[in-house]
Amino acid sequence: MAEQGVLDGVRVLSLEQVHALPWGTGFLADLGADVIRVESPDHLQDRKAGPFPAGTAGEEWWNEAGNMVYYGARNKRSLCMVVTHLRGKEVFLKLVEKADIVTDNFRPGTMQRFGFDHDSLSAINPRIITLSSTAYGYTGPWRRAGSRARTVDAACGLSYLTGYEGGPSQRASPNYMDHSVGNNVAYALLLALYQRNRTGKGMRVDLTMLETGVSAVGPAILEAQRGITRERLGCAHWWKAPHNVYPARGDDRWIVIVVSSDAEWEALKGAMGRPQWAEEAKFATALARWRNRHELDELIGNWTSQHDDLELAQRLQGLGIAAGSAMAAEDLVHDSHLRERGYLWEFSNPQAPAVGSRVFAGRPYKDPGNPMSIEKVAGLGQDNDAILAELAGLSPAEIGELESEGVVYGAPRPDEARP
Amino acid sequence: MPGILSELRVLELTHRPSGAYCAKLLADQGADTIKVEPPGWGDQARHEPPFIDEVPDPDRGTSYLAFNTNKRGITLDVEQADGRELFQRLAATADIIVESFPPGKLAELGLGYEQLSQSNPGLILVSITYFGQDGPYAGYQGDDLVAQAMGGYLYAVTGSASKPPMGTALQQMEITAARNGAVAVMAALLRREQSGKGTHIDVSTMEAAVSTPSGLIHPYTYTGRNPHRGGSDGNVMDGMHLPTLDGEVTLTTAGTGGRPMEAWAEFLEEPGLLDSRFASRAGRMEHWEELHGLVAPKLAQWTNLDLMRETMARGLVVGLVQTPQQVVESPHLEERGFFVEMDHAGAGTLQYPGSGFFIDGENAMASARSAPRLGEHNVEVLCGELGLTVRELGLLRAARVI
């Protein structure tokens, strides 16, 4: 975060859980917005989800989960408050007066039940931008359906299109959709702020995981309308060969090699020591290589399996061939390129001293005008007092009442189950 | 609604889907986006199969059509002096330039950030490359699969544990890089409103891939274990795809109040699911074949849409594994008005996906202009705006600059 973040002065109230929305508001927090994560003591799943050091939740587990650093609470503040309690609702609505954005990822209908729907909030603050991030949206016959990122990976068409060559469909990822939606949330919120700078008016954003997913498989959507079937090819390609993942020396080590031209094929042959098989006519042209790609893949695999993937990838890249090791997380943490670019961020959370210093993925872009880093990670309810006093205008006595009435919490309830 | 970005001009000078998609995200919000393509050949995506109606015409490549909506298109060879000069003149009018040359190439052409920002200090230049502008891999070659591999996604996410790594379809790393680029552009635009200054943004597709599993690096640094592919292997209740009458579905144990087998036994009318072997997740994984034998025949009696409706009514959570055809015909998406109809001189009328969000109830897609034909707006932009005569345009075309 820059000394003076671009979103300094922008306040976000986020009723957020799980992954997609916190990922999205995380961008705003990194850019300097005051993102207040409004958490319920009744739903601490995110803080229980880990990962925890060595897989074991510690004494203050609620502040120790790695996901809270990576997106849940990083550069945010935390207000742990029961917004369904009458007093909690009062406080929330007071905060809305001083907020620019309210986001939620409840199922459609819940915000209205709380009295927090766009029209109600807009009556309090006409400049308010509200965004609901849901699986299927506020309209349409599926609006009440529950979801997981994986079930929307399926519904948007991506799972159907993904699979080993000749094999069945397979879900692309358990959480790519969360990530993708989070990015779209950040984009939509920044667009909304940009627009409000012009009009002075708030707006209502209905953003869905299903539609974000469909927008990422556009080519297949067009093809389907004209009867074109896109077969599953695993790591193979519609027109390039070789283009696949090949075994390397060692256990579960793999290398990707991509050849896009005759010149690259010549270079690859050179790297392989010009074996006799590679000189055969059936591999001489791009078309021949593609037609005979299964045999080609097997022969290349015989060669790659004798080599270290990291070394071989570096050698092939030196020859101008697109190649890369299938890196495991451990490889990435030690990767010289990512280290040198400052992509890996080391952070030690003062709220979780037992965890110590850990390495996290950074942001995949650099902008010297808007530098980003992890400055702080909000512990559960860490900012209750500051928020209630400064923003909601409550006296210490009133804050004390909220605590004793079970409206705000600085830690999980004593009987909360440990993860 | 006029698009939110309708006062802005974007130039796109890219060679990969990531750049095209990033510019599309801005174009779909109304930015006047001019796609600059090499004369004669154009965007590589024009030439990649499949093609609409199997006509291998450069206006019918489906990736090209899908990733270039709401743009205008001109041709310019920026490696020739006249092309460079025309590009510089356009760049002076631009708010944002999206490019994907190998690092350093743009500066070599005299079109780098230092050069262009001198006459246009508010310019936001976005460079999207596979490995970024600096670091040991900056000169490496890449594509989506290489990014999946080097970004850790291939090893950890999609495939089966007992098989080689396997990738996600349809170049999702390119799209993720593009989405990050669009977020960076919006932040830079807001910064520019405060400072008047533009910036040079460096997006790396490899790094976008690392961030995509949303938990690759820190799960390792917390636990010492490498995240590994295969999470849906043998996972009947939480991952596998199971056949229905007219497609496939994937189940979840969500929405069952912590009693998944009771809820599903009741819904599927299959008391065998109550067997104690299936009571725990570990037990379900160990006996997955028997469990599959009970669940699959029951699901096979349902059509997808009936199953979705009835599970939804009971609070159960499933995912229909929809074919692209089923997505296009989705009654849900139709009622929401998600698809935007666009007409194209080569490809005809097609339904295109919207942006993924609605603003004040309206699909946030500024207009319904389909992808430009090669050089479609040459006269409009180069003559109409930059003042070339048609004769000069002809001269430059003959010289293969345009």
Image (tube, coloured by chain):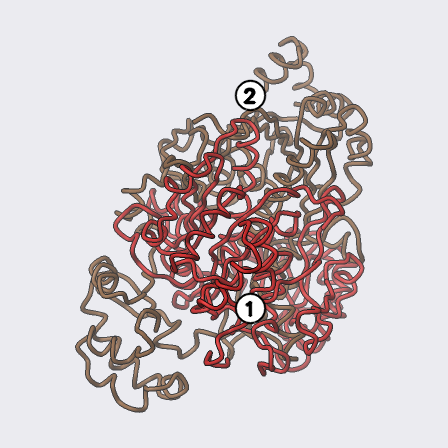
Task: Please give the name of the residue rendered at 39% of the width and 31% of the height, measured from the top-left corner.
Answer: B342
Q: Are marks 1 and 2 in contact (CB under 8 Å)?
A: no
Q: Element at badge 1?
A: loop
Q: Chain of mark 2?
A: B
Q: Amino acid at mark 2?
A: His
Q: Element at badge 2?
A: loop
Q: Position of residue B338 (x, y in %)?
A: 36, 41
Mark 2 lies on residue: B377
Task: Please give the name of the residue rendered at 48% of the width and 39% of the height, measured from the top-left corner.
Answer: A128
Task: Please give the name of the residue rendered at 67% of the width and 31% of the height, measured from the top-left corner.
Answer: B193
Question: Quick one: label 1, few (<14), some, or many (20+) residues within 10 Å?
Answer: some
Task: Please give the name of the residue rendered at 62% of the width and 26% of the height, measured from the top-left corner.
Answer: B75
Q: Chain of mark 1?
A: A
In terms of depth relative to the viewer, which is nearer, B34 or A277?
A: B34
Q: Position of residue B305 (x, y in %)?
A: 23, 57
In terms of depth relative to the viewer, which is nearer, A200 or B402?
A: A200
Question: Quick one: label 2, few (<14), some, or many (20+) residues within 10 Å?
Answer: some
- Would you place residue B322 above or below residue A294 in this image? above
Question: Which chain identifier belongs to the brown chain?
Answer: B
- Report which quarter residue A147 is drawn in: bottom left
- Would you place residue A129 above or below residue B256 in this image? above
Report whether residue A332 is seen: no
Q: Position of residue B398 (x, y in %)?
A: 67, 18
Figure colour of chain A: red
- Would you place residue A264 above or below residue B374 in this image? below
Mark 1 lies on residue: A410
